[in-house]
Image (tube, rainbow, N blue to C red):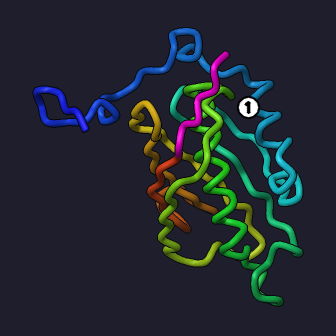
Amino acid sequence: MTTDNTGKTPDAQPVAAPESINRGWPEQLARAMVAGAPYSAALGFRFVSSSPGFGTIMLPWRDDLVGLEGTGILAPGAVTALIDHTCGLAIMSTFGAMAAPATLDLRIDHLRPAAPNTAVTAQAHCYKATRTIAFLRAEAWDVSRDDPVATAQAAFTLNRREA
């Protein structure tokens, strides 16, 4: 394995998104990514926003997504799916669809149950990328972003396809 003069492997060097991508992923494609995946459509995800390095998606409250009947609290698995998909949106808002990201590692701290009968919103930030891996942080909240339901740290592979 080769290293540069800092002792880092070539994969450890940050990779900037192409200039055309840095202007933002077209909102139409971001909305299609959120609504188009079968599981995101089944869960009812709603696109909120995206910009280079960021993605935000909302999971509306539905009775069939409640984890424990009678509580009105969204199941943690639905929140996990929301965070995972939001991380994908943050990557694709930076690198475009050609990044073809796949979850490599997703660590979620479920801090508290979501408020009953309340939607949950997640935002992910792609804060660093190498040639083959993107690193993200994410938060999910219900009533107040200052009191998150869950936080996450993630790594996604970048399976960049040739244009």
Quick check: 144 left or right of 68? left
Q: Residue furthest front?
A: 1
> Vertical placement of 20 versus 133: above or below?
above
Out of 12 and 24, give the one closest to the viewer.
Answer: 12
Residue 91 x %, y %: 57, 36
Q: Amino acid at mark 1?
A: Ala
User: What are the residue bounds of the magenta stretch?
Assistant: 157-163
Is 25 part of what is drawn in magenta? no
Q: How many marks?
A: 1
Q: Which of the two residues, 112 or 76, is positioned nearer the viewer here?
A: 76
The residue wearing badge 1 is 30
In the image, is 153 to the left or to the right of 59?
Answer: left
The front one of 145 and 34 is 34
Please state, as top left, top right, bottom left or bottom right, where the C terminus lies in the image.
top right
- Which sits in the foreground, 153 or 54? 153
Q: Is residue 63 positioned above or below 53 on the image?
A: below
Q: Which residue shows up at 46% across the image and 36% down it?
A: 132
Q: Is residue 75 above or below residue 10?
A: below
Q: Residue at x 72, y 67 (%)?
A: 78
- Position of the N terminus, as image quadrant, is top left
Can you give x and y, in whole percent of width and height, for residue 15 in the image?
40, 25
Height in image: 123 above or below 145?
above
Secondary structure under the numbered disc 1 in the rendered image: helix
Q: Quadrant of residue 133?
A: top left
> Which residue does the image show at 22% across and 33% down from the upper left?
2
Considering the whole magenta stretch, tell me its main secondary structure.
loop
Q: Residues within 10 Å of mark 1 (few under 14, many from 20)?
A: many
In the image, taking residue 158 as reference, residue 129 lies left or right, namely: left
The residue at the point 73 percent across, 31 percent down is 30
